[in-house]
Amino acid sequence: MGWEELVGQERVRDTLRRALQGRRLAQAYLFYGPPGSGMEPAALLFARALQCLRGEADPCDACSACQKVRALLHPDVHVLFPAPTDASEEEIAAQRALLAEEPYAELDWSRRALSEERARNKQALYSMAMIEALRRAIYLRPYEGPYQVVLLLEADALRQEAANALLKTLEEPPERAVFVLSTSRPERLLPTLLSRTQKVRFEPLTEALIEEALRARGLGQQEASLLARMAAGNLSRALSLLRVSWSAEREAALRWLRALATGRRLEMLRYVEEAQRISREQLKDRLQTLLFWLHDLWRYRIWPEPKGLYYPDQIEVLARFHRNLPGVDLEAMIAALEEALEAIERNGNALLVCMALSLRLERALRREAVSSWR
Ligand SMILES: [Zn+2]
Protein backbone atom coordinates (compact mmCIF):
# COMPACT_ATOMS: atom_id res chain seq x y z
CA MET A 1 0.00 0.00 0.00
CA GLY A 2 1.45 3.33 -1.04
CA TRP A 3 -0.15 6.41 -2.56
CA GLU A 4 -3.36 4.49 -3.27
CA GLU A 5 -4.15 4.94 0.42
CA LEU A 6 -4.91 8.56 -0.44
CA VAL A 7 -8.60 8.84 -1.38
CA GLY A 8 -9.07 10.83 -4.61
CA GLN A 9 -6.75 13.86 -5.02
CA GLU A 10 -5.05 12.60 -8.22
CA ARG A 11 -3.54 16.01 -8.94
CA VAL A 12 -1.97 16.23 -5.47
CA ARG A 13 -0.64 12.70 -5.78
CA ASP A 14 0.96 13.47 -9.18
CA THR A 15 2.58 16.66 -7.88
CA LEU A 16 4.08 14.95 -4.85
CA ARG A 17 5.21 11.84 -6.73
CA ARG A 18 6.94 14.03 -9.33
CA ALA A 19 8.75 15.92 -6.58
CA LEU A 20 9.79 12.65 -4.96
CA GLN A 21 10.94 11.05 -8.21
CA GLY A 22 13.74 13.52 -8.80
CA ARG A 23 13.98 14.46 -5.12
CA ARG A 24 13.31 18.02 -6.26
CA LEU A 25 11.88 19.14 -2.99
CA ALA A 26 10.67 22.45 -1.68
CA GLN A 27 11.82 23.35 1.78
CA ALA A 28 8.26 23.83 2.99
CA TYR A 29 4.87 22.83 1.63
CA LEU A 30 1.44 24.11 2.51
CA PHE A 31 -1.30 21.50 2.09
CA TYR A 32 -4.60 23.35 2.13
CA GLY A 33 -8.19 22.46 1.36
CA PRO A 34 -11.46 21.58 3.04
CA PRO A 35 -11.26 19.58 6.30
CA GLY A 36 -11.27 15.81 5.88
CA SER A 37 -10.10 15.95 2.25
CA GLY A 38 -6.89 14.02 3.01
CA MET A 39 -4.20 16.58 3.86
CA GLU A 40 -3.00 14.67 6.93
CA PRO A 41 -2.80 11.24 5.25
CA ALA A 42 -1.06 12.85 2.26
CA ALA A 43 1.50 14.47 4.59
CA LEU A 44 2.13 11.15 6.31
CA LEU A 45 2.48 9.32 2.98
CA PHE A 46 4.89 12.00 1.78
CA ALA A 47 6.96 11.56 4.95
CA ARG A 48 6.94 7.79 4.46
CA ALA A 49 8.12 8.10 0.84
CA LEU A 50 10.90 10.52 1.90
CA GLN A 51 12.22 8.14 4.55
CA CYS A 52 11.62 4.84 2.72
CA LEU A 53 14.87 2.92 2.38
CA ARG A 54 14.17 2.21 -1.32
CA GLY A 55 14.11 5.92 -2.06
CA GLU A 56 11.45 5.81 -4.76
CA ALA A 57 8.37 7.96 -5.40
CA ASP A 58 6.18 5.37 -3.72
CA PRO A 59 6.79 4.19 -0.17
CA CYS A 60 7.40 0.42 -0.19
CA ASP A 61 5.53 0.00 3.08
CA ALA A 62 7.66 -3.03 3.92
CA CYS A 63 10.98 -1.58 5.09
CA SER A 64 11.62 -0.65 8.69
CA ALA A 65 11.55 3.10 7.89
CA CYS A 66 8.10 2.86 6.29
CA GLN A 67 6.79 0.93 9.25
CA LYS A 68 8.20 3.40 11.75
CA VAL A 69 6.68 6.38 9.93
CA ARG A 70 3.33 4.62 9.74
CA ALA A 71 3.38 4.00 13.49
CA LEU A 72 4.51 7.63 14.09
CA LEU A 73 7.67 6.27 15.71
CA HIS A 74 10.32 7.41 13.21
CA PRO A 75 12.88 9.59 15.04
CA ASP A 76 13.29 11.90 12.02
CA VAL A 77 9.60 12.46 11.36
CA HIS A 78 8.13 15.01 13.72
CA VAL A 79 4.33 15.04 13.69
CA LEU A 80 2.90 18.00 15.56
CA PHE A 81 -0.69 19.01 16.13
CA PRO A 82 -2.36 21.61 18.35
CA ALA A 83 -3.88 20.61 21.69
CA PRO A 84 -5.93 22.38 24.37
CA THR A 85 -3.72 23.85 27.10
CA ASP A 86 -5.11 21.46 29.70
CA ALA A 87 -4.81 18.28 27.59
CA SER A 88 -3.07 15.50 29.50
CA GLU A 89 -0.14 13.43 28.19
CA GLU A 90 -2.54 10.48 27.92
CA GLU A 91 -5.02 12.44 25.84
CA ILE A 92 -2.27 13.57 23.46
CA ALA A 93 -0.89 10.03 23.23
CA ALA A 94 -4.40 8.78 22.47
CA GLN A 95 -4.73 11.24 19.57
CA ARG A 96 -1.34 10.13 18.19
CA ALA A 97 -2.37 6.48 18.44
CA LEU A 98 -5.61 7.26 16.63
CA LEU A 99 -3.70 9.07 13.85
CA ALA A 100 -1.25 6.17 13.50
CA GLU A 101 -4.10 3.73 13.15
CA GLU A 102 -6.28 5.88 10.88
CA PRO A 103 -4.58 8.83 9.14
CA TYR A 104 -8.02 10.20 8.21
CA ALA A 105 -9.02 10.39 11.89
CA GLU A 106 -10.31 13.76 13.04
CA LEU A 107 -8.18 15.56 15.61
CA ASP A 108 -11.15 16.18 17.79
CA TRP A 109 -11.06 17.58 21.31
CA SER A 110 -14.69 18.62 21.38
CA ARG A 111 -16.02 15.29 22.60
CA ARG A 112 -14.35 15.61 25.97
CA ALA A 113 -16.90 15.97 28.76
CA LEU A 114 -17.81 19.61 29.03
CA SER A 115 -17.05 20.93 32.48
CA GLU A 116 -16.92 24.71 32.95
CA GLU A 117 -13.14 24.61 33.28
CA ARG A 118 -12.70 22.58 30.12
CA ALA A 119 -15.11 24.68 28.11
CA ARG A 120 -12.80 27.63 28.72
CA ASN A 121 -9.68 25.71 27.66
CA LYS A 122 -11.10 23.84 24.73
CA GLN A 123 -9.38 25.77 21.96
CA ALA A 124 -6.55 23.69 20.55
CA LEU A 125 -3.38 25.71 19.88
CA TYR A 126 0.34 25.23 19.32
CA SER A 127 2.23 26.19 22.45
CA MET A 128 5.59 27.91 22.40
CA ALA A 129 7.00 24.89 24.25
CA MET A 130 6.03 22.60 21.37
CA ILE A 131 7.90 24.71 18.81
CA GLU A 132 10.92 25.04 21.11
CA ALA A 133 11.05 21.26 21.56
CA LEU A 134 10.84 20.86 17.79
CA ARG A 135 13.70 23.32 17.25
CA ARG A 136 15.89 21.43 19.70
CA ALA A 137 15.13 18.14 17.92
CA ILE A 138 15.71 19.23 14.33
CA TYR A 139 19.00 21.05 14.76
CA LEU A 140 20.51 17.69 15.63
CA ARG A 141 21.73 15.81 12.55
CA PRO A 142 19.25 13.34 11.12
CA TYR A 143 20.48 10.10 12.54
CA GLU A 144 18.34 7.54 10.81
CA GLY A 145 16.62 8.74 7.66
CA PRO A 146 17.95 10.90 4.85
CA TYR A 147 15.66 13.79 5.86
CA GLN A 148 14.22 15.55 8.83
CA VAL A 149 10.50 15.73 8.10
CA VAL A 150 8.31 18.08 10.09
CA LEU A 151 4.53 17.86 9.80
CA LEU A 152 2.51 20.64 11.39
CA LEU A 153 -1.15 19.67 11.20
CA GLU A 154 -3.83 22.36 11.54
CA ALA A 155 -1.13 24.98 11.18
CA ASP A 156 -3.69 27.80 11.50
CA ALA A 157 -3.56 27.06 15.25
CA LEU A 158 -0.06 28.63 15.31
CA ARG A 159 -0.54 31.95 17.05
CA GLN A 160 1.80 34.92 16.79
CA GLU A 161 4.63 33.83 19.09
CA ALA A 162 4.75 30.19 17.97
CA ALA A 163 4.36 31.21 14.31
CA ASN A 164 7.32 33.59 14.59
CA ALA A 165 9.48 30.90 16.18
CA LEU A 166 8.60 28.58 13.30
CA LEU A 167 9.34 31.33 10.80
CA LYS A 168 12.78 31.74 12.33
CA THR A 169 13.33 28.00 11.83
CA LEU A 170 12.33 28.27 8.17
CA GLU A 171 14.71 31.18 7.70
CA GLU A 172 17.70 29.23 8.98
CA PRO A 173 16.58 25.70 8.22
CA PRO A 174 18.52 22.70 9.42
CA GLU A 175 20.10 20.66 6.63
CA ARG A 176 17.89 18.34 4.62
CA ALA A 177 14.73 19.35 6.42
CA VAL A 178 11.31 19.22 4.73
CA PHE A 179 8.34 20.96 6.33
CA VAL A 180 4.68 20.27 5.57
CA LEU A 181 2.05 22.55 7.05
CA SER A 182 -1.59 21.56 6.61
CA THR A 183 -4.66 23.71 7.15
CA SER A 184 -8.25 24.21 6.11
CA ARG A 185 -7.91 27.93 6.87
CA PRO A 186 -4.79 29.21 5.05
CA GLU A 187 -6.02 32.81 5.41
CA ARG A 188 -5.26 32.58 9.12
CA LEU A 189 -1.55 31.93 8.61
CA LEU A 190 1.05 34.68 8.88
CA PRO A 191 1.69 36.03 5.35
CA THR A 192 5.45 35.76 5.96
CA LEU A 193 4.98 32.08 6.75
CA LEU A 194 2.68 31.52 3.76
CA SER A 195 5.18 33.10 1.38
CA ARG A 196 7.84 30.54 2.34
CA THR A 197 5.72 27.56 1.33
CA GLN A 198 4.89 25.79 -1.91
CA LYS A 199 1.10 25.51 -2.06
CA VAL A 200 -0.66 22.21 -2.70
CA ARG A 201 -4.42 22.48 -2.97
CA PHE A 202 -6.81 19.66 -1.98
CA GLU A 203 -10.33 19.29 -3.41
CA PRO A 204 -13.40 18.30 -1.39
CA LEU A 205 -14.10 14.57 -1.74
CA THR A 206 -17.17 13.44 -3.64
CA GLU A 207 -19.90 11.44 -1.93
CA ALA A 208 -18.98 8.44 -4.12
CA LEU A 209 -15.31 8.55 -3.04
CA ILE A 210 -16.25 8.78 0.63
CA GLU A 211 -18.69 5.92 0.26
CA GLU A 212 -16.00 3.81 -1.42
CA ALA A 213 -13.48 4.64 1.34
CA LEU A 214 -16.00 3.65 4.01
CA ARG A 215 -16.79 0.38 2.23
CA ALA A 216 -13.06 -0.32 2.06
CA ARG A 217 -13.07 0.06 5.85
CA GLY A 218 -15.65 -2.69 6.16
CA LEU A 219 -18.93 -0.78 6.25
CA GLY A 220 -22.07 -2.13 4.63
CA GLN A 221 -23.62 -0.44 1.60
CA GLN A 222 -26.49 1.23 3.46
CA GLU A 223 -24.44 2.65 6.32
CA ALA A 224 -21.64 3.78 4.00
CA SER A 225 -24.05 5.64 1.75
CA LEU A 226 -25.84 7.32 4.69
CA LEU A 227 -22.59 8.48 6.31
CA ALA A 228 -21.17 9.65 2.96
CA ARG A 229 -24.24 11.84 2.47
CA MET A 230 -24.01 13.26 6.01
CA ALA A 231 -20.27 13.92 5.76
CA ALA A 232 -20.52 16.56 2.99
CA GLY A 233 -17.09 15.97 1.45
CA ASN A 234 -15.29 15.33 4.75
CA LEU A 235 -14.06 11.75 5.16
CA SER A 236 -12.69 12.46 8.64
CA ARG A 237 -16.12 13.65 9.73
CA ALA A 238 -17.67 10.47 8.30
CA LEU A 239 -15.27 8.37 10.38
CA SER A 240 -16.11 10.38 13.51
CA LEU A 241 -19.81 9.95 12.83
CA LEU A 242 -19.17 6.24 12.71
CA ARG A 243 -18.34 6.30 16.40
CA VAL A 244 -21.69 7.85 17.28
CA SER A 245 -24.37 5.45 18.37
CA TRP A 246 -26.99 6.61 15.90
CA SER A 247 -29.77 4.32 16.96
CA ALA A 248 -29.38 5.37 20.63
CA GLU A 249 -29.38 9.08 19.75
CA ARG A 250 -32.34 8.62 17.44
CA GLU A 251 -34.30 6.75 20.10
CA ALA A 252 -33.65 9.51 22.63
CA ALA A 253 -34.74 12.15 20.12
CA LEU A 254 -37.91 10.29 19.19
CA ARG A 255 -38.87 9.77 22.84
CA TRP A 256 -38.62 13.51 23.25
CA LEU A 257 -40.79 14.10 20.17
CA ARG A 258 -43.40 11.68 21.50
CA ALA A 259 -43.45 13.43 24.87
CA LEU A 260 -44.02 16.72 23.06
CA ALA A 261 -46.73 15.32 20.81
CA THR A 262 -48.66 13.86 23.73
CA GLY A 263 -48.22 16.83 26.05
CA ARG A 264 -46.16 14.96 28.67
CA ARG A 265 -44.31 18.01 29.88
CA LEU A 266 -42.38 16.47 32.76
CA GLU A 267 -40.82 13.97 30.43
CA MET A 268 -40.04 16.74 27.96
CA LEU A 269 -38.30 18.75 30.71
CA ARG A 270 -36.20 15.76 31.69
CA TYR A 271 -34.97 15.55 28.14
CA VAL A 272 -34.19 19.26 27.99
CA GLU A 273 -32.37 19.09 31.30
CA GLU A 274 -30.23 16.27 29.95
CA ALA A 275 -29.07 18.55 27.14
CA GLN A 276 -26.81 20.44 29.50
CA ARG A 277 -25.11 17.30 30.82
CA ILE A 278 -24.09 15.74 27.52
CA SER A 279 -21.27 17.18 25.39
CA ARG A 280 -22.07 19.79 22.79
CA GLU A 281 -21.09 17.35 20.02
CA GLN A 282 -23.43 14.70 21.37
CA LEU A 283 -26.25 17.21 21.55
CA LYS A 284 -25.59 18.20 17.95
CA ASP A 285 -25.64 14.53 16.91
CA ARG A 286 -28.94 14.05 18.68
CA LEU A 287 -30.59 17.08 17.08
CA GLN A 288 -29.12 16.05 13.73
CA THR A 289 -30.70 12.59 13.89
CA LEU A 290 -34.06 14.18 14.64
CA LEU A 291 -33.61 16.55 11.71
CA PHE A 292 -32.90 13.64 9.34
CA TRP A 293 -35.87 11.78 10.72
CA LEU A 294 -38.15 14.77 10.02
CA HIS A 295 -36.75 15.03 6.49
CA ASP A 296 -37.71 11.37 6.04
CA LEU A 297 -41.18 12.08 7.37
CA TRP A 298 -41.53 14.95 4.93
CA ARG A 299 -40.61 12.65 2.03
CA TYR A 300 -42.97 9.98 3.27
CA ARG A 301 -45.80 12.47 3.34
CA ILE A 302 -45.47 13.38 -0.35
CA TRP A 303 -44.46 9.93 -1.56
CA PRO A 304 -45.56 6.90 0.45
CA GLU A 305 -42.88 4.65 -1.06
CA PRO A 306 -39.93 7.00 -0.75
CA LYS A 307 -36.43 6.23 -2.00
CA GLY A 308 -33.21 7.54 -0.49
CA LEU A 309 -34.44 7.82 3.10
CA TYR A 310 -31.86 8.55 5.79
CA TYR A 311 -33.36 5.79 7.92
CA PRO A 312 -34.99 3.16 5.69
CA ASP A 313 -35.41 0.93 8.76
CA GLN A 314 -37.83 3.47 10.25
CA ILE A 315 -40.56 3.22 7.64
CA GLU A 316 -43.13 1.72 10.02
CA VAL A 317 -42.47 4.34 12.70
CA LEU A 318 -42.89 7.02 10.02
CA ALA A 319 -46.17 5.48 8.87
CA ARG A 320 -47.50 5.38 12.42
CA PHE A 321 -46.47 8.94 13.17
CA HIS A 322 -48.03 10.16 9.93
CA ARG A 323 -51.29 8.32 10.68
CA ASN A 324 -51.60 9.64 14.23
CA LEU A 325 -50.52 13.21 13.52
CA PRO A 326 -51.35 14.02 9.91
CA GLY A 327 -51.63 17.77 10.37
CA VAL A 328 -48.31 18.74 11.98
CA ASP A 329 -46.42 21.68 10.55
CA LEU A 330 -43.33 19.80 9.38
CA GLU A 331 -41.70 22.78 7.66
CA ALA A 332 -41.84 24.73 10.93
CA MET A 333 -40.32 21.80 12.84
CA ILE A 334 -37.48 21.44 10.35
CA ALA A 335 -36.80 25.18 10.45
CA ALA A 336 -36.82 25.14 14.29
CA LEU A 337 -34.29 22.29 14.39
CA GLU A 338 -32.01 23.89 11.82
CA GLU A 339 -31.98 27.11 13.81
CA ALA A 340 -31.34 25.28 17.08
CA LEU A 341 -28.38 23.47 15.50
CA GLU A 342 -26.99 26.80 14.34
CA ALA A 343 -27.44 28.27 17.80
CA ILE A 344 -25.56 25.34 19.38
CA GLU A 345 -22.84 25.74 16.76
CA ARG A 346 -22.51 29.40 17.76
CA ASN A 347 -22.04 28.36 21.38
CA GLY A 348 -25.59 29.14 22.50
CA ASN A 349 -26.64 27.97 25.95
CA ALA A 350 -27.69 24.32 25.50
CA LEU A 351 -30.46 24.45 28.09
CA LEU A 352 -32.06 27.60 26.70
CA VAL A 353 -31.76 26.50 23.09
CA CYS A 354 -33.42 23.15 23.85
CA MET A 355 -36.14 24.75 25.94
CA ALA A 356 -36.99 27.19 23.17
CA LEU A 357 -36.80 24.38 20.61
CA SER A 358 -39.22 22.26 22.67
CA LEU A 359 -41.78 25.03 22.78
CA ARG A 360 -41.49 25.62 19.06
CA LEU A 361 -41.81 21.92 18.22
CA GLU A 362 -44.76 21.58 20.57
CA ARG A 363 -46.59 24.39 18.82
CA ALA A 364 -45.78 23.02 15.38
CA LEU A 365 -47.07 19.62 16.45
CA ARG A 366 -50.32 21.36 17.35
CA ARG A 367 -50.15 23.47 14.23
CA GLU A 368 -50.30 26.87 15.83
CA ALA A 369 -48.67 29.92 14.36
CA VAL A 370 -45.03 30.13 15.40
CA SER A 371 -42.84 33.15 15.41
CA SER A 372 -39.08 32.85 15.26
CA TRP A 373 -37.34 32.85 18.65
CA ARG A 374 -34.00 33.89 17.37
ZN1 LIG B 1 9.92 1.58 2.64
Image (cartoon, rainbow, N blue to C red):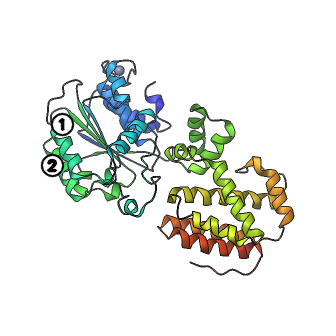
Question: Disc 2 vs disc 1: which is toward the camera?
Answer: 1
Instruction: Looking at the image, tell me whether mark 2 or mark 1 is earlier in sequence order.
Output: 1
Secondary structure at numbered mark 2: helix
Q: Amino acid at mark 1?
A: Ala
Task: Inspect this view and state whether residue 92 appears.
Answer: yes
- Eyeballing the image, is 255 above or below 38? below
Tell me where residue 87 appears, x and y as whole percent: 34, 50
Depth order, front residue of 166/351: 351
Name the residue rendered at 72%, 81% in the picture: 369
Tell me where residue 221 appears, x and y as whole percent: 68, 37
**Quadrant in which residue 262 is drawn:** bottom right
Task: Inspect this view and state whether residue 302 appears.
Answer: no
- Eyeballing the image, is 236 above or below 339? above
Q: Amino acid at mark 2?
A: Lys
Tell me where residue 166 appears, x and y as whole percent: 20, 48
Depth order, front residue of 77/191: 77
Name the residue rendered at 63%, 53% in the picture: 249
**Quadrant in which residue 93 is drawn:** top left
Mark 1 Cα shell of 10 Å, populated few (<14), some (14-19), many (≥20): some
Q: Is residue 126 left or right of residue 273?
A: left
Alpha-carbon distance for marks 2 and 1?
Answer: 15 Å
Seen from this angle, which residue lies furthest right?
Answer: 323
Depth order, front residue of 63/3: 63
- Quarter of the figure that contains the C terminus: bottom right
Q: Which residue is mark 2?
A: 168
Mark 2 Cα shell of 10 Å, populated few (<14), some (14-19), many (≥20): few
**Quadrant in which residue 18 is drawn:** top left
Q: Is residue 200 left or right of residue 251?
A: left
Depth order, front residue of 237/207: 237
Q: Which residue is mark 1?
A: 137
Instruction: Say how many tags the image has.
Output: 2
